[in-house]
Image: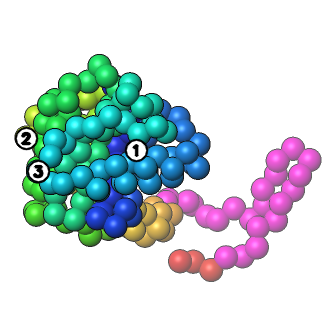
Amino acid sequence: MIKAILIFNNHGKPRLIRFYQYFTEEMQQQIIRETFHLVSKRDDNVCNFLEGGSLIGGSDYKLIYRHYATLYFVFCVDSSESELGSLGLIQVFVETLDKCFENVCELDLIFHMDKVHYILQEVVMGGMVLETNMNEIVAQVEVQNRMEKSEGGLSAAPARAVSAVKNMNLPEIPRNINIGDINIKVPSLSPF
C-alpha cells in the first residue's frame, strides 16, 4: 500500500504532499524533511529505491523516487508493494502530467494544484492504485475540463446566481411575510 506521495523541488520545497496514513502535521513536516535529505544526497546514477527513514517506518517501508529536472517524485510504500511497479506508477503519473500540461514544470504544480490533485486521484486513492492506463486518465481529465467549462467554473457562480434571481417569475414582491405569530414587513426594493 502507498503510505505517502511527496513531490518537492531541488531545494526541499514541497509542491505536492499526500499522506494516506494519519500523521500529525508536525510529524508530516519531519517526514518531508527527512525524506528530502535521504533522497537529495543520492547520486543520479544510483538505485531509485531505499529504505524508509526512521520516522516513516524504517525497514518496513521503502522510498521509491525519480528525479526529473527540478522535481523529486517520491512514493513511500510498505513492503507489500513492488519497487518496479511503484517506479512505473511514478512514470505514468509524470507522463500524464506532461500530457495534461504540455511539458509539465514546477510552476504547473504550483498554479494548477487542483488539477494535479485530480490527476493524482485518478491514479491513486486511499493508498491504492486505481488506474495505470495513461490514456484513460487523460480522458477522465478531459471530461472534467469540459464539465468545468460548461459550468463556467467557480468564477462565474455569482453571475449565474444573479441571473437566476432575475429570471425568477414572481408575480409581485411580497410585502408582508407571516410566519405563525411573527409578522415581517419587507421594505420596498428597487427592481434589478
Q: Which residues are magenta?
A: 168-189
Query: Residue 90 location, x and y as percent?
Result: 19, 42
Mark 1 closeness class: few <14, some 14–19, many ≥20 residues within 10 Å: some
Please name the amino acid that badge 2 sits on: Asn
- The residue at the point 37 percent across, 54 percent down is 37
The residue where tag 1 is placed is 18
The residue where tag 2 is placed is 135
Please name the amino acid that badge 3 sits on: Asn
Q: Which mark is residue 45?
A: 3
Query: Residue 104 location, x and y as percent?
Result: 16, 62
Instruction: Work out which residue is located at the far bottom of the displayed protein and give it.
Output: 190
* In the image: residue 58, left or right of residue 9: right
Please name the amino acid that badge 1 sits on: Arg
Please state, as top left, top right, bottom left or bottom right, where the N terminus lies in the image. top left
Magenta stretch contains residue 179: yes
Query: Residue 7 location, x and y as percent?
Result: 31, 53
The kind of secondary structure the magenta stretch mainly shows is: loop
